[in-house]
Image (cartoon, rainbow, N blue to C red):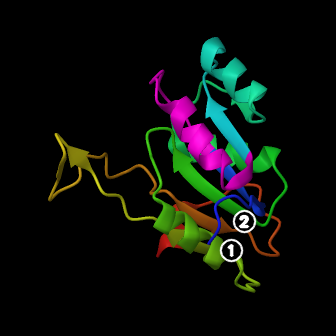
Amino acid sequence: MNSSSVFKNISVIVAYRNSGGHLLDMFVDLKLWFSEITIVGPNYSNNSQKIKSLGGKWIETESCSVQNLWEKGIQSVHSDWYLLLEGSEYISTVLKESIVEASNLKLIESNWFPIKREIFFLKQRLKYPLEWTYDPKPGLFFKGTDKLNQINIDKIEN
């Protein structure tokens, strides 16, 4: 897969809940693959101005729920495919290729493709993830023909 071609049929929604400095690096890496990237979270003027200047979209909200942030992003973008991520995640090239291949499937009903996280601490992969179990998992979401105003990741995952 050639990463120089940008895929327009997938809208990336990033739930951003902190002021970490790696968001810009994550955005630049995603921009090589995806044309429409929306960051949803509190307004950090330095980051939001840089993201906007690079062609991204920033939706300001004070919600701290990942699902609420994703829903707000989905409501602002019209697409069939949504890549739902958190602001602290990096995606490998192999995973990006798999996401692009999945988006080429001819689906009718809404579908959820969860992304399995790999957590590293001091350059060691952790056996058990250090994450809050009630937050929804990132993944690729196909909206389908349903007119959804809200997503329910719990129903989709099962």
| Label 2 element class | strand
Residue at image coords 73%, 68%: 143
Residue nearer the viewer, 122 or 105: 122
Query: Is 26 contained in the magenta span?
Result: yes
Which residues are drawn in magenta?
14-36
Mark found first going from the N terminus, 1 or 2: 2
Q: Above or below — where is 38 with respect to 153?
A: above
How many angstroms separate mark 1 from mark 2 (CA)?
7 Å
* Residue type, mark 1 in image: Ser
**Can residue 44 be seen from the camera position used here?**
no
The residue where tag 1 is placed is 103
Quadrant where the N terminus is found in the figure? bottom right
| Label 1 element class | helix
Residue at image coords 83%, 66%: 147
Q: Above or below — where is 80 with respect to 30?
A: below
* Residue type, mark 2 in image: Trp
Residue at image coords 60%, 39%: 27
- At which x and y percent is residue 2? 65, 67
Q: Are marks 1 and 2 in contact (CB under 8 Å)?
A: yes
Q: Above or below — where is 138 with respect to 107?
A: above
Compared across the picture, whether 5 is left or right of 145 comes to left
Q: Quadrant of residue 37?
A: top right
Compared across the picture, whether 23 is left or right of 58 comes to left
- At which x and y percent is residue 18? 47, 25
The label on residue 16 is none
Residue at image coords 47%, 54%: 91
**Can residue 56 be seen from the camera position used here?**
yes
Q: Above or below — where is 117 with respect to 123?
A: below
- At which x and y percent is residue 40? 65, 35
The residue where tag 2 is placed is 81
Compared across the picture, whether 130 is left or right of 13 comes to left
- At which x and y percent is residue 124? 15, 50
